[in-house]
Image: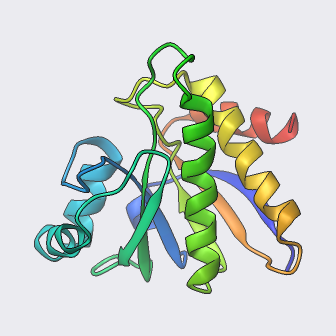
């Protein structure tokens, strides 16, 4: 198997991958958007309990829980930055959220991972720039881990976001 990065128009909660990534908040609590959908589909009470036991997660980092009722065995909860104009370390924090997620996937022997475009929803990170950081971080991980093949799939809900992701991959 060779590592790959792709974009699919699909519901992340329905993905048949080893692990999916939740665009989490620092409290690891049930939120809206991708986070809310993942909690609802995974089993909100069990997932909330698992997250509560972890206690929280710093921006730019990630933690892992079981996938509960999802097809995915695990959920990685990655906390991306809130966009504050681009001069508050947002790029480094977003890059780190992807990097830490991929490190956790590797530590847990996951060979396929489904990502949302972290921070590009209610956290306000500009979509084009969010894609560029996401693809660069994933590409760097693949390059730095040649002995660990992994299938990276970005789950998006719109044709526009799919096109943006494919463009970012092509220009990386």
In which quadrant of the rendered view does residue 107 lie? Answer: bottom right
Considering depth in this image, is 48 or 3 the residue closer to the camera?
48
The answer to whether residue 133 is left or right of residue 46 is: right
Identified at 48% across, 55% down, the residue is 61
> Is 70 drawn above or below residue 140 in the view shown?
below
Q: Is residue 110 visible?
A: no
Identified at 54% across, 79% down, the residue is 18
Question: Could you say where residue 9 lies in the image, as x and y percent from the top left?
Answer: 55, 48
Q: Residue furthest left?
A: 45
Question: Could you say where residue 54 lies in the image, as x and y percent from the top left?
Answer: 26, 71
> Is 10 drawn above or below residue 32 in the view shown?
below
State the scheme by which the image is colored: rainbow
The answer to whether residue 23 is left or right of residue 27 is: right
Question: Could you say where residue 89 lies in the image, as x and y percent from the top left?
Answer: 56, 28
> Is 123 drawn above or below residue 35 in the view shown?
above
Number of numbered callouts drawn: 0
Identified at 54% across, 55% down, the residue is 115
In which quadrant of the rendered view does residue 149 lie? Answer: bottom right
Considering depth in this image, is 4 or 162 the residue closer to the camera?
4
The answer to whether residue 165 is left or right of residue 88 is: right
Considering depth in this image, is 135 or 108 the residue closer to the camera?
108
Question: Could you say where residue 100 lies in the image, as x and y percent from the top left?
Answer: 58, 60
Quadrant of image for the C terminus: top right
Identified at 55% across, 40% down, the residue is 93
Quadrant of image for the N terminus: bottom right
Q: Residue furthest bottom?
A: 109
Q: Is residue 149 visible?
A: yes
């Amino acid at each position: 198997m060779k590592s790959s990065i792709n974009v699919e128009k699909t519901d992340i909660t329905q993905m048949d991958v080893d692990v999916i990534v939740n665009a989490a908040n620092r409290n690891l609590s049930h939120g809206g958007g991708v986070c809310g959908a993942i909690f609802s589909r995974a089993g909100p009470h069990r997932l909330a309990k698992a997250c509560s036991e972890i206690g929280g997660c710093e921006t730019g980092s990630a933690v892992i829980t079981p996938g509960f009722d999802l097809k995915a065995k695990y959920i990685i909860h990655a906390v991306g930055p809130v966009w504050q104009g681009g001069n508050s370390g947002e790029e480094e924090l977003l890059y780190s959220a992807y990097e830490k997620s991929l490190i956790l996937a590797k530590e847990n022997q996951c060979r396929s991972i489904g990502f949302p475009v972290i921070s590009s929803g209610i956290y306000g990170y500009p979509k084009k720039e969010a894609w560029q950081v996401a693809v660069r971080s994933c590409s760097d991980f693949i390059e730095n881990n040649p002995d660990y093949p992994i299938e990276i799939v970005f789950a998006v809900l719109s044709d526009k976001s799919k096109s943006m992701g494919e463009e970012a991959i092509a220009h990386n």
